[in-house]
Image (spheres, rainbow, N blue to C red):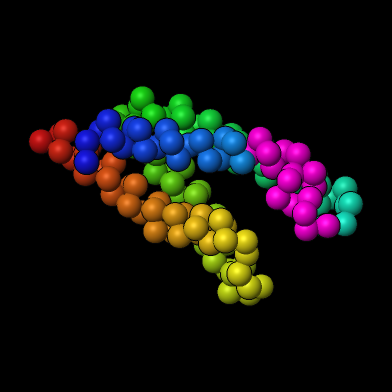
Amino acid sequence: MSLRQLQITTALLGAVPVLTGLISMMGLSDPLYATLALPRDATLDSNMRFLGGVWLGLGLCVWWLVPRIASQTALFRAVWLMIFLGGVGRLVSLLAVGLPLWPFVGFTVLEIVGAPLFVWWQRKLRNDALR
């Protein structure tokens, strides 16, 4: 589990919020939601586009972090904390409303299980480098 492996994995995972953030900025016209026949509501569309922009920004932040993973511990942890909290929100929705589309179940697992693993991985590499 080298620094290079962490950087590559982080860069690949960073593509998810970048790509889905761009798509989410389509609001109710997002192909995923368009098939659900949601009502044309300006508030819902605005909120979806806003959250898509935030998600895109998080993905760009992840990409910015890639070459700086070893030195930007606080930001790396903050990014993964945000992702973890998003997963908690998805888990609450899953329990309160029911199962979402299958990709979102996978995202939930990555967010809740993966976030702590990535923080641990970066911490281990940083501790090993300090020895």
Residue at horizontal 74 percent and vertical 44 percent from the top: 30
Q: Is residue 29 magenta?
A: yes
63 or 71, which is in the foreground?
Answer: 63
Q: Where is residue 52 drawn, in percent x and y? A: 67, 41
Q: Where is residue 44 drawn, in percent x and y? A: 81, 52
Whether 70 is drawn above or below 41: the answer is above
Asked if residue 24 lies left or right of residue 86, the reply is right
Specify the quadrant that holds the N terminus. top left
Whether 69 is drawn above or below 34: the answer is above
118 or 35, which is in the foreground?
Answer: 35
6 or 33, which is in the foreground?
Answer: 33
Q: Is residue 125 magenta?
A: no
Asked if residue 117 lies left or right of residue 28, the reply is left
Q: What secondary structure prevails in the magenta region?
A: helix
Image quarter for residue 12? top left
Q: Where is residue 16 drawn, in percent x and y? A: 53, 41
Q: Does the image show residue 3?
A: yes
| Outermost residue toward the left in this view | 131
Q: State the extent of the magenta-drawn residues as a range.
A: 21-37
Image quarter for residue 78? top left
